[in-house]
Image (tube, coloured by chain):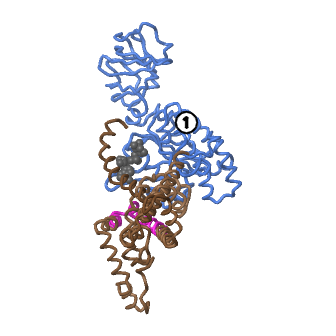
Amino acid sequence: MARTERKAAEIDATGIGKSFGTFKALTDVTLTIARGEFLTLLGPSGSGKTTFLMVLSGFEPPTTGRLLLDGRDMTDISPEERGFGMVFQGYALFPHLTVEENIAFPLKVQRRGRAEIRRRVAEIIEMVGLGGHGHKRPAGLSGGQQQRVALARALAYEPPVMLFDEPFSALDRNLRSQMQDEMRRIHRETGTTFVFVTHDQEEALTLSSRIAIFEAGCLQQIGSPRDIYERPGNRFVAEFLGDINVLPIRDGKLEGREVTVQGDPDGDLAIRPEYMRIALQAPAEGNAVAARLTDLTYLGGVTRLNLRTAGGAELVLSVPTAELSDGLTPGAEIWATWPGERAFML
Amino acid sequence: MTRRHMLLLGPLLLFLAAAYLIPFLGVMRWSVTLPEPGLHQYRAALTDPLVQSVIWRTLRICTMVTVITVAAAYMLALIWVRSGPVARVLVELCILIPFWISVLTRAFGWLALLSNRGLVNSWLEALGIIDLPLVMVRNEFGVVVGMVHFLIPFAVFPIATAMRNVDERVLMAARSMGASRARIFWQVFVPMTRPGILGAMLLVFVFSLGFFITPAILGGGRSVMVAELIYLRLFQSPNWGLAAAMSVILMAGVGLLIALLLRQLGERTAR
Ligand SMILES: Nc1ncnc2c1ncn2[C@@H]1O[C@H](COP(=O)(O)OP(=O)(O)OP(=O)(O)O)[C@@H](O)[C@H]1O
Ligand SMILES: [Mg+2]
């Protein structure tokens, strides 16, 4: 697949803005999508993810800003000329064509030879696991199979960039995670640049090499899943991506006890549920806060604990079940502890 | 369907039976009993050179009318569904106004336009484009023009419905693959609207088979079609048995067409 790897492209977006009338759907989005990377656009509904994808694809011209493709300005280039592979939420298959014909369509557009088309279609059908379904029409396929056809059709002509708009949102959980695995494999095998829209945080964390968080048309943060999860740039990102505990700090102290604080000694300290543990007695040293256990949910390997501190802050802890002593029941007076380097100020 | 639904549908079914089924059974009876029992009227209908030529002309005119009407309606529907608000309102007027004018008025309107001393010929003569008037009425041309004009609005609706059902994202997907406008239109859009095209064709063809006033006026008695011939056999040179036999043949033909189309549509969705 060396050939496709060469084809992967790099995109530079600078100051992209998009207004619909007076409404600003995107404001000053600047980011670079590296060659062959898997970038996920994540954000709540209406945050402008689809709009940004439409700007990338060329279907929506940006109101402000420039787009570069491998260093060349492509802001005013038509979607046909950009030729990015697109996979839409509703699959957008050609209903009157069979699976094979759907996949062959872009190859015919490119006027490839008959034999080459046949070979390529067979190869790609194999790649997305659709063997034996080549002669069916989309209406005769399950949701997951249609999704694969959409993927195959977009991959078939080896576009320099693949754009996905919530491709899995109609699939059930099992199928979804199966498709996610395949997406990663296909991304690896093709080496193409993938831009993927979702509002499922877990999906974003599993799939991407980097995540771009959008809110209200603004890019909030872009970074590796780990960066974004563990070093969120602001409160919105911290709270959007999974659960987080927020504790008010005054003068370097939390409810009277000294805690490790980097930077400003007044503000909100944030800690992910996975990094907090419990202690039955007050620890002699280290970060801790006294709390009452209000609820306890067994989730198999981990147990979820809900605590309320004396000061009234609600905490969520995700603790390996193996570390918990039996006989812990709601109402118990315990302590929540955490390693200082895992906490950050918002 | 529940019993309640059936009860609600009851009056309608009764009405349909009283208005269509019973009279049709009566016509079928005439066709095998008048003037004496037997199938000889069918034999006559199918062998009589006059009837044959009328059936042949009817099929020819109806086919032409269907093709022209559906092609024109497709373009109109395309503008209606896929263009800006101004064009949309104009098309809506074009589609709706004809519904407010009776068939008779419209046929005479075309007569006024197309006859030897009609508007079109006088203009063309005034402009020096022609010396002798073009003969555009009292022949098949006039009949076709009148019928197409009448039928276009009916064809627009099923086609427009099919066009509205086309998912915009499918067209975007095709564009992103680099397909040209022409390719997207012919290889994606048109096939996706096929059910609407077939429906419109059937509607127009069946409708045009029964046309009566328009051919009578614009054809001027020279381009007699089946419906007019049946009328003539009923009231001008009466032969009710023959008229009934021709009616039954017409009905059978229409039924066959509908069955074929339904099978076509069924096959597409089943696979
Ligand atoms: N063509 C348009 N005209 C007017 N407003 C639009 C248009 N397209 C999008 N918007 C608005 O822009 C905002 C961002 O929309 P967008 O579809 O990009 O959101 P999204 O992040 O994809 O949301 P979701 O997760 O619900 O798909 C929304 O408030 C939407 O109403
Ligand atoms: Mg969206």
Magenta part of the protein: which range?
A: B63-91
Q: Mark 1 lies on which chain?
A: A
Give the left or right position of residue A310, taking residue B146 as reference. Answer: left
Nearer to the camera, B186 or A7 = B186
- Residue at 34 percent across and 35 percent down: it is B3
Residue B157 falls within the magenta-colored stretch:
no
Query: Is residue A25 something one can see in this rendering?
Result: no
Nearer to the camera, A80 or B83 = B83
Give the left or right position of residue A131, taking residue A92 as reference. Answer: right
Chain A on-screen colour = blue
Chain B on-screen colour = brown
**Residue A15 rendering spot, x and y as whole percentages:** 43, 53
User: In the image as oriented, which residue stretches furthest toward the front?
Assistant: B36
Give the left or right position of residue A206, taking residue A334 as reference. Answer: right
- Residue at 41 percent across and 9 percent down: it is A328
- Asked if residue B220 is positioned above or below residue A190 in the image, the reply reads below
Q: Which residue position is annotated with label 1?
A: A180
Nearer to the camera, B100 or B160 = B100
Query: Is residue A322 something one can see in this rendering?
Result: yes
**Residue B239 rendering spot, x and y as whole percentages:** 41, 67
The rendered magenta stretch, by its main secondary structure, is classed as: helix
Q: How crowded is mark 1: few (under 14 residues within 10 Å), some or many (20 or more)?
A: some
